[in-house]
Image (cartoon, rainbow, N blue to C red):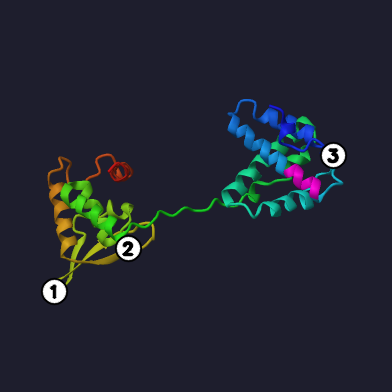
């Protein structure tokens, strides 16, 4: 597919960018190739409008040409910004090789790419939370009771699988707490709990009592190690 439909043919660098894109995308699907062409087109339009004096590859400089293009992209969504930056980096790397201009490969640096935005999970509604708890109560198996315990104590899953058999402590008359061992927060703590959580711990002890493995001091059995147990619990959560 000819690049002239996507890149201004009157730009002096159009043909060289076309060849670089065609070389990079020879084994890629059409949509990936289209995105590379779009990135090349955007960069050359920017150069033509803002730096019309640039007519050869050896005139390209990080400042102002590349850094100026970065500023031009900042109105885009972060994911689009990052993808265009990385595609132009690949194109310049290809040109550095084919045109014997090694400095082109250093115009865009690895650290120029910002961190992708962190997508946090959406909070459950009160109705969803209630429905999930009711389903876990209905199941009443080992994994269901583990997740109910997590829900009512705020523990991390890695902390939960490290709980000891005697994690439930009587801290005062009619007052109970769970001793949470060292975890991701690098500190141990006592988490106050109500009677329902005490029942959950007793249920988990009941399940542990049926395990054929000898007691190792943990509330939850880990026949294949901690990592395998966490993987099994996450599998349960993702497939319910």
Instruction: Bin the neighbour count of mark 3 within 10 Å (Cα to Cα): few under 14, some 14-19, many 20 and up.
Output: few
Main SS, magenta region, reads: helix
Quarter occupied by the C terminus = top left
Q: Give the extent of the magenta segment.
A: 43-49
Q: Is residue 215 above or below residue 192?
A: above
- Please tell me which residue lies in front, 122 or 214: 122
Q: Marks 2 and 1, Cα distance to the nearest angstrom?
A: 23 Å
Q: Which mark is residue 188?
A: 2
Q: Marks 1 and 3, Cα distance to the nearest angstrom?
A: 83 Å
- Please tell me which residue lies in front, 47 or 111: 47
| Magenta-span inclusion, residue 54 | no
Q: Nearer the viewer, mark 2 or mark 1?
A: 1
The residue identified by callout 3 is 56
The residue identified by callout 1 is 173
Mark 2 residue element: loop
| Magenta-span inclusion, residue 47 | yes
Image side of residue 75 versus residue 65, left or right: left
Q: Considering only order in the chain, which callout, 3 or 2, is on the residue closer to the N terminus?
A: 3
Residue 4 percent coordinates (x, y) = 75, 32
Q: Is residue 140 visible?
A: no
Mark 3 residue element: loop
- Identify which residue is drawn at 20% across, 50% down: 135
- Identify which residue is drawn at 15% across, 47% down: 207
Image side of residue 188 versus residue 168, left or right: right
Quarter occupied by the N terminus = top right
Q: Is residue 154 above or below residue 136?
A: below
Q: Considering only order in the chain, which callout, 3 or 1, is on the residue closer to the N terminus?
A: 3
Q: Nearer the viewer, mark 2 or mark 3?
A: 3
Residue lying farthest to the front in this orientation: 5
């Amino acid at each position: 597919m000819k690049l002239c439909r996507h890149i201004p043919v009157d730009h002096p660098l159009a043909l060289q960018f076309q060849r670089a894109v065609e070389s990079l995308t020879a084994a890629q699907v059409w949509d990936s190739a289209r995105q590379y062409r779009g990135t090349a087109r955007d960069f050359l339009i920017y150069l033509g409008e803002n730096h019309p004096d640039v007519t050869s590859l050896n005139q390209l400089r990080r400042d102002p040409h590349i850094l100026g293009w970065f500023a031009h992209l900042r109105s885009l969504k972060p994911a689009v910004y990052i993808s265009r930056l990385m595609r132009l980096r690949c194109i310049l790397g290809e040109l550095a090789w084919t045109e014997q201009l090694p400095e082109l490969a250093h115009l865009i640096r690895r650290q120029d790419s910002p961190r992708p935005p962190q997508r946090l999970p959406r909070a459950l509604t009160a109705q969803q939370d209630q429905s999930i708890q009711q389903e876990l109560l209905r199941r009443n198996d080992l994994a269901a009771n583990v997740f109910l315990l997590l829900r009512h104590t705020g523990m991390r899953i890695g902390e939960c699988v490290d709980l000891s058999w005697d994690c439930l402590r009587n801290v005062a008359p009619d007052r109970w707490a769970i001793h949470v061992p060292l975890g991701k927060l690098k500190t141990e703590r006592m988490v106050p709990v109500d009677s329902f959580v005490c029942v959950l711990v007793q249920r988990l002890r009941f399940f542990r009592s049926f395990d054929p493995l000898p007691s190792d001091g943990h509330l939850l059995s880990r026949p294949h190690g901690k990592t395998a147990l966490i993987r099994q619990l996450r599998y349960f959560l993702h497939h319910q």
